[in-house]
Amino acid sequence: MKFAIVGKGGVGKTTLAAVLARRLADRARRVIAVDADPDGNLASALGVAEDVQPEPIAHMRQLILERTDAIDEGMGLMFKLNPKVDDLPDRFSVDADGVRLLVMGTVESGGKGCMCPEGAVLKALLQHLLLRVDDDVILDMEAGLEHMGRASAKGVDALIAVVEPGLRSVHTARRVGELASDIGIGRTLVVINRVRNPEDREVLSRALAGQEIIGVLPYCEELVRADLEGRTVFVEDRDFGAAVDAVGEKLERMLEHV
Ligand SMILES: Nc1ncnc2c1ncn2[C@@H]1O[C@H](COP(=O)(O)OP(=O)(O)OP(=O)(O)O)[C@@H](O)[C@H]1O
Ligand SMILES: [Mg+2]
């Protein structure tokens, strides 16, 4: 199954991506976790030590130039839009205890729908992972909606919009759902995170009426401490772990055609 985790800033996208990846891999699934956030920290969340964290693909200048045959013709940059990328996942992913991690990095020239050699390689690589690789692929996206304009996650089976108690995150989730259909992603599922009490859950369920809620994750003090102390997101809190497992199982049932 292939899915992208989206939502407002700080709602818990990376935490969910890392814990889901870990728990799916622990059940002998082959998992590729992709840090698609230019300012991402999925490697640390997965516990990959700083000195072995993968170099972001977008920063591999030489590789990008070679693969896209980029040449500056004076009139402008010419480059291939369909570079070869099928060897990149094996070459540039690092193993985080059975989860393969790929880091996309920032496209410096930026801008909406940027088409530049880096953008062409990242786009081709994501499409390769989503359409031609059998493993589970989990994309940890950047916060907000901008990536929807670039259609980076086009090809996923579903978007998972994370919301937290707070209506701004609900609005982001709703907007993501609306934009998803424009790029051909038929399914947006919602995970509610950081729920402290039944009232949080009720208010959010009401605000999310009509959307498909596939999980409710409790507020977890241990996660806050882990982040403060620079530890991984793999906490011992059983309630949190069980709630993420329930999301994983639901996704398997919903996204896999047996
Ligand atoms: N259920 C939870 N209970 C308590 N703290 C949580 C929970 N989920 C995530 N957090 C904490 O919230 C903070 C933000 O989480 P995380 O980095 O996963 O969010 P994000 O959506 O990926 O953020 P960004 O938009 O910056 O990428 C972290 O300190 C994390 O430990
Ligand atoms: Mg994040």
Image (cartoon, helix red, strand yellow):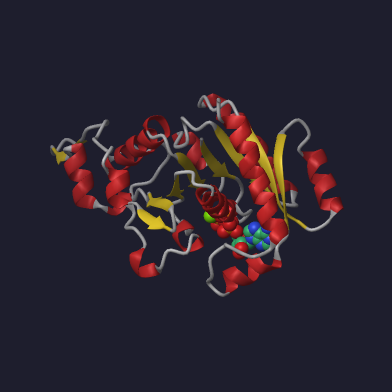
Q: Say if residue 175 shows up in the picture.
A: no
Judged from this view, the residue extending furthest toward the front is: 28
Give x and y (percent) for residue 245: 64, 48
Give x and y (percent) for residue 243: 70, 50
Q: Say if residue 159 shows up in the picture.
A: yes
Viewer-closest of 202 and 175: 202
Give the residue drawn at x 32%, y 57%.
55
Asked if residue 26 is positioned above or below residue 152 in the image, the reply reads: below
Looking at the image, residue 17 sits to the left or right of residue 126; the answer is: right
Looking at the image, residue 112 sits to the left or right of residue 158; the answer is: left
Looking at the image, residue 43 sits to the left or right of residue 121; the answer is: right
Looking at the image, residue 46 sits to the left or right of residue 50; the answer is: right
Give x and y (percent) for residue 3: 53, 38
Give the residue drawn at x 30%, y 37%.
120
Which quarter of the figure has residue 71? top left
Asked if residue 245 is positioned above or below residue 114 in the image, the reply reads: below
Give the residue drawn at x 65%, y 38%.
250
Quadrant placement of the C terminus: top right
Viewer-closest of 35 and 257: 257
Judged from this view, the residue extending furthest toward the bottom is: 229
Viewer-closest of 126 and 145: 126
Viewer-closest of 147 and 51: 51
Give x and y (percent) for residue 35: 44, 50
Give the residue drawn at x 61%, y 43%.
248
